[in-house]
Image: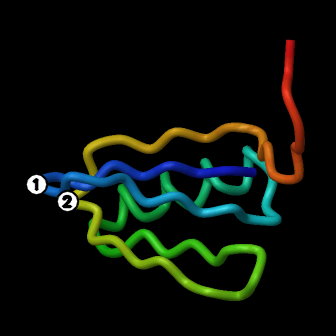
Amino acid sequence: MEVKIGVQNANRELTVDTDLDADAVEKQIAAALSGGGLLTLTDAKGRRVVVPVEKLAYVEIANSTAGQVGFRS
């Protein structure tokens, strides 16, 4: 899954490509929001992204599009 995280007062969004499915990512986001702490996601390479939930602007969950090569019609 590709997760795009918008952070308040930041010009760029964070993009995390994770092995979790959409439901698992949504549960992690909901738990972080209800706890009022940190949203922590681990990408496919083992790197962690940590964002304070009070700074979240939006979170977009989409299917990963990695590996596409060439032109599309």
State the count of labels.
2
Q: Quadrant of the C terminus?
A: top right
Dot 2 amino acid type: Lys
Q: Nearer the viewer, residue 66 or 64?
A: 66
Q: Residue at x 26, y 44 (%)?
A: 57
Disc 2, SS: helix
- From this viewpoint, which residue is outermost toward the front? 71
Query: Which one is in front, 52 or 11?
Result: 11
Task: State the image coordinates of residue 5 (x, y, percent, origin top left).
Answer: 42, 52
**Disc sitting over residue 28 in the figure:** none
**Front position in the image: 13 or 40:** 13
Mark 1 secondary-structure assignment: loop
Furthest-top residue in view?
A: 73
Callout 1–callout 2 Cβ contact below 8 Å: yes
25 or 71: nearer the viewer: 71
Q: Which residue, given by chain and number where applicable, does mark 2 sit on?
A: 55
Occupied quadrant, residue 63: top right
Residue 72 vs 50, above or below: the answer is: above
For the residues labelled 1 and 2, the Cα–Cα distance comes to 8 Å
Near mark 1 (Cα within 10 A), the count class, few <14, some 14-19 or many ≥20, is: few
Q: Of the residues shown, which amino acid type is indicated by label 1? A: Asn
Q: Extreme left residue here?
A: 9
Q: Residue at x 42, y 64 (%)?
A: 32
Q: Is residue 70 above or below residue 2?
A: above
Residue 26 on image: x %, y %: 61, 48
Residue 14 falls in image quadrant: bottom left
Pointer 2 local density, CA inside 10 Å: few below 14, some 14–19, many at least 20 = few
User: Is 32 placed left or right of 69 in the picture?
Assistant: left
List the residue tagged with mark 1: 9
